[in-house]
Amino acid sequence: MSYPSRYLTTFTFPSPVFREKDFAYHLQPHLASLGLSESQISLALISGPLCGAVLQPVFGSWSDRYHSSWGRRKPFIVFGAIWLIASTLCLAWARSIIALLISDIATQETQDTLLSSFSILTVFSMYAAVQAVQIGMRALIIDGCSLPEQAEANAWAGRYIGVGGVLGNLAALLDDLSRQVERDNCRTILMVSELAVPYYVNMNL
């Protein structure tokens, strides 16, 4: 491929890993295990489409007008990736973080309330960070490809998104098969994505 094919590989992550339909399937039981009610889980899950509808245009417009020694898109990809890593780590170990911070100074009821609030805010933060990374990666196709190449580049991006979705769900399946006791497939997917973030971001630098 004459156009920058390295840009396409970045679509393997994070698009499919954090697609609302697929990721929410694994995220919902994880949030339930943290003590969130059904209404609180719904509030957390709505952050995916909400952030996509509101923040993608904001980050897109901002990156179009942004100028730095890194260019227009790379700062959004790098800082968005750091933001995303921090958010997903907090979500994966939310219970441990809350217990570490306040277990000695708060009642169990207070801990549960703070854990629910922290989990919801972390999900919102995670989906917001995804928008910053995604918009930078998507814009790279426009910036790095000519008009005739953009159609083919977007087609290949769609293929990589499909492959990434399969790999993300396969990671959860393998974890499910290997652990016959209490499982947390959401945490597995989060950790797989954590390992993937630096690799795919580095391909754009």
Image (cartoon, rainbow, N blue to C red):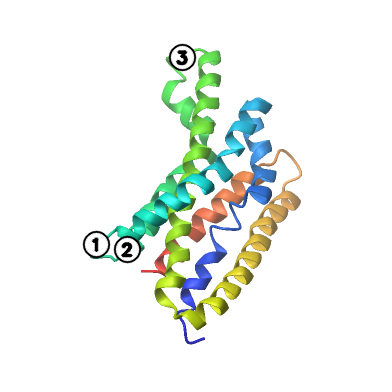
- Tell me the mark number nearer the camera, choosing from 1 and 3: 1
Give whichever of discs 2 and 3 has the lower sequence position: 2
Q: Which residue is mark 1?
A: 68
- How many angstroms separate mark 1 from mark 2 (CA)? 7 Å
**Where residue 127 sits: x, y (%)?**
51, 45
In the image, which disc is placed on residue 106?
3
- How many angstroms separate mark 2 from mark 3 (CA)? 45 Å
Give whichever of discs 1 and 3 has the lower sequence position: 1
Horizontal side of residue 36 vs 139, given as left or right? right
Residue 99 higher or lower than 126, as above or below: above
Q: Residue at x 68, y 62 (%)?
A: 166
Q: Secondary structure at mark 3?
A: loop
Label 1 crowding class (10 Å Cα cut-off): few <14, some 14-19, many 20+? few
In the image, which disc is placed on residue 86?
none
Q: Residue at x 40, y 47 (%)?
A: 83
Q: Which residue is mark 2?
A: 72
**Where residue 23 sits: x, y (%)?**
64, 48
Q: Secondary structure at mark 2?
A: loop
Q: Residue at x 65, y 44 (%)?
A: 24
Amino acid marked by disc 1: Ser
Q: Quadrant of residue 181?
A: top right
Label 3 crowding class (10 Å Cα cut-off): few <14, some 14-19, many 20+? few
Amino acid marked by disc 3: Ala
Are the residues flagged by discs 1 and 2 in contact, CB closer than 8 Å? yes
Can residue 90 be seen?
Answer: no
